[in-house]
Every structure is written in structure tokens, then in C-alpha cells.
Amino acid sequence: MKKILVANRGEIAIRVMRTAKKMGIKTVAIYSTIDRQSPHVKYADEAVLIGEAPSNQSYLLGDKIINVAKDLNVDAIHPGYGFLSENADFAEACEKNNIIFIGPKSHAIRVMGSKLAAKDTVKSYDIPMVPGTDEAITDIPEAKKIAKEIGFPILIKASAGGGGKGMRIVENETEFESQMDRAISEAVNAFGDGSVFIEKYVASPRHIEIQVLADTHGNVIHLFERECSIQRRHQKVVEEAPSSVLTPKLRQQMGDAAVRVAKACDYVGAGTVEFLLDENLNFYFLEMNTRLQVEHPVSEIITKTDLVELQIKVARGEVLALKQEDIKIHGHALELRVYAEDPLNDFLPSVGTLEVYKLPKGDGIRVDNGFEEGMEIPIYYDPMISKLITYGNTRDEAISLMKYAINDYQIEGIQTTLPFGTFVCEHDAFRSGNFDTHFVKKYYSANTLLEQQKTEAKLAALIAVQHYLKTQKLLRIPD
Ligand code: MV4
């Protein structure tokens, strides 16, 4: 493998190219008109303009990207996350054109893209699943009977959904039919597929996912868990590894289950198996994401691995050099997604120019970044600017470093989720590890953040005055 095309933009494109360079592999970037000046374009050995800003005219044009790859003698395409990364047809088209798709085979992508097919595929592999139906609902009265047996509240999920899309809670029996009608028509509209199923609603779960890695020789390992419960409307904001609630035994059980899920769909490459964990520490399989995830760095740090390197080696047909028993957890890692969104204004996208943009530096700090000073944040794509990752020997160390790094990160010109990161790091529920997927909804409001900022501003002012008075030797104020 001499040359890789990265079919993505922003921080993940750079992240992938960084490892390719390390491995002596040439890189090709693609870009849209609005990304002409983007760092990922400058970072690559070659770069090709692929189309206009809207992603359906650029980063989603699979055939055009494959033609570019063929023209430039590219051996493999890395799709990053989002865009074409979980498009089974694209993975297939790559293979048909003799280009390696750095990811699983189209079969695994297809199976896991359908939540019902996924359940069906893993059900003989001893994987705990939430009580519910395992076929598309065609008979609503029959479904209602099942719902009553399971017990309300229940959740209606679209088979073609995932990541929280196409879900409806049904609190009680009386609203069952109306919610079912809505769920089906929503699924038809959103996915062109009205298949829905029901599950018992797990009220206050944690979202814990397991990183897996499989080679083409039948070896499958896991790289432990990531705790991803700090999310807002299904958008993760803070992730960490390891989780502070898993016991070694539970960790092993979940890891083994994740490996079985990967085996069930003949998985190849890096993937993630999502679980819900309830208050009694029962875990249930939710879905599998067949891509490299945004939050992969926390797993890399605690396992001392480079997941992109491992993906590339697997794609080259190498046998996994790592054995399960070789992989240990080292320390603790935290990740904050830095979005161009205003936490004081309902997380609305904050458009503008990065007038000042300086990254934090230091031991235990990693920034996976896609922008530089002077750039505008395009409105066409995901508003994530970077990922701020901190790590240390303990969770407390990682949290302290995160607070330090947030302060040291200078961004002017737009609003970002950095202050929200401080809010999370200072919250007792987060610090104690006692939280679930409702953390943001339960504890966060713009006001609490404002109050926190005011208190900090007052403290800073006091310290400044004290310092001034001391250095001026005008008067001593009591410490
Ligand atoms: C659930 C659930 C409760 N009970 N399924 C959301 C993302 C998608 N992967 C599935 N999700 C959920 N499925 C049952 N039976 C709660 C969620 C859920 C959730 C899961 C993980 C992270 C954040 C979440 C936020 C709200 C709901």
C-alpha cells in the first residue's frame, strides 16, 4: 500500500494522514470549493478539488472519488467517519475498482445498518438484548399485546435509524397506536423504510461502547470500553476511557460480547459495539458502528495503540500482531468535542471567523484539530472544530488537565463548547462518576454556566486586585 486517498475533511482527514505519513504511505486529499485553504488540503501530498461545498456535491460523490483514486493510482481509500464511511455500496464499488476500502466488507456494513438485521445476525451468539420484538411490526394490535407484556414505557425504533434517529417513547397503552402511526410515517419519510420494532425503554442508562478490531484471518480482539453518556440530543460531548463503573468482570463480559458481535457479522477492521448499561449494571446490545469513531483517541491512549495504523495493517491483509492478553489499560483519558456552537444559546451553530486560534500544549494533552487561525467555519458540514483530549494516571488527573487545557485553548471570533467542558469537569455528578445519559438534560442550563462564569470572573478580579495592591505595596490586605 503506497498511496491512500482520504475521503474526508477536517480533523479526521489530518488524523488519518498523520499515521499514513508515519508509515511511509503517500496521501491524497479531496476537497470542496469552500475547503480550498483547509489544513487537510495542505497536509496531503496531493489534493484534488471534488466539487461544490454542499456534501452531496463533493464529499458524498462516491463514483467521482473512486475515479480520482484511479487517476492517481491510489491503492486504498480511508473514509474517516460520517460521509461515505458507512455506505455499503461505496465499500463495494471500491473493491470492484480494485481499490481497498479501509473498513469492513460491505456485508457487515449492510447488516449493521439495519437494526433488525443486526439483532437477527447476533441473536445466536449469546448477546444480551433489551426485551422487545425482533421483526418489523406489521400487525399493530399484536405489537400492542407484546408491549403490554413487556410493560410501559416502551420505545419504538426505526430499523433504518440508529444513533438516536427514528426513536419514540410510548409512555402508556392509550398512546400506543398514535405513536406507532407517527413512528412509521417518520421512518418512511426519513429513511424510505417504514420498518419499526419495539423495545422495553431502559430509563436511565449509561452509554458504554466497546472498541473492537478484527483482521482478515479470523482474529478479533477488543480494546476495552468508552463511556459516552455525556451527550446532548444524541450528540456526544465528553467521552472517556475507561468507564468508572465497570468492574473487571463486567468489562470482560462486555468485551467478550462485543467480540462475538463482530464475529457474527464477519467483521474486519476497527468497529464499535454500543451497549446500554442499566442501574443494576445489566448490559444490552444496541447497535454496531462500522467505522472509526470520533472518540477513538481515548481508546488509543489507554491501550497505547494507533487505531489508524491497525486499520491500515488489517487492510493490507496482515495478521493482528496484538493478542487480547497483550492489551492492558494504562491510565485514563478524556475527550471534549469542541464544537462551533454557543452553549449559552441552546447550542446554536456559531458562525464566524477564528480571529484568534491557539491550541493548548503540554504533557497529557492531545488536540486532534482541523482548523487554523483566520479560517471561517463552513456552515455546510459538522460544526466540530477539534477534539481536546487529556490523559493521566488517574481520572482526576485527566479531569484537572482538561480544565487547564480548556483555559489554555484560545479561541476568539466564535462561541464554542469549551465552557461547557468546564461545566462538566466541575460538576459533582461527573466528578464522582455517578451520571447517566440524562446528565446534560438534568443538570445543564445556560444560567448555571453564566453563574459559574460570573463567579470565576469575580474571583479573577479579586486575585488581580490583590496582586496589584501587593506589587504596588500600597497596602496589605488580609490573605
Ligand atoms: C435505547 C434507550 C433506552 N432503551 N433503547 C439512543 C441512541 C441509539 N443507539 C439508541 N439509543 C437509546 N436506545 C432502549 N431500549 C435509550 C437510548 C438513548 C441513548 C443511548 C445512548 C446514548 C444516549 C442516549 C440518549 C437518549 C436515549
Image (cartoon, rainbow, N blue to C red):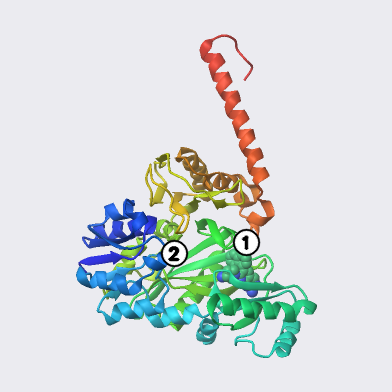
Residue drawn at (64%, 34%) of the image: 455
Secondary structure, mark 1, is loop
Residue drawn at (41%, 75%) of the image: 87
Kindly tell me whether residue 206 is visible in this rendering. no
Could you tell whether 288 is left or right of 36 in the image?
right
Residue drawn at (61%, 29%) of the image: 459
> Is residue 120 or residue 377 the one in the foreground?
377
Kindly tell me whether residue 447 is visible in this rendering. yes
Tell me which corner region of the image, top left, top right, bottom left or bottom right, holds residue 199. Answer: bottom right
Amino acid type at image mark 1: Thr
Amino acid type at image mark 2: Gln
Q: Identify the residue under disc 2.
A: 293
Q: Position of residue 229 (x, y in %)?
A: 58, 60
Q: Identify the residue under disc 1.
A: 437
> Is residue 275 or residue 376 the one in the foreground?
376
Dots 2, 1 in contact, CB < 8 A: no
Question: Which residue in the rendered view is the most extreme toward the front?
Answer: 52
Q: Position of residue 437 (x, y in %)?
A: 62, 61
Disc 2 to disc 1, C-alpha distance: 19 Å
Q: Earlier in the sequence, mark 2 or mark 1?
A: 2
- Quarter of the N terminus within the rendering: bottom left
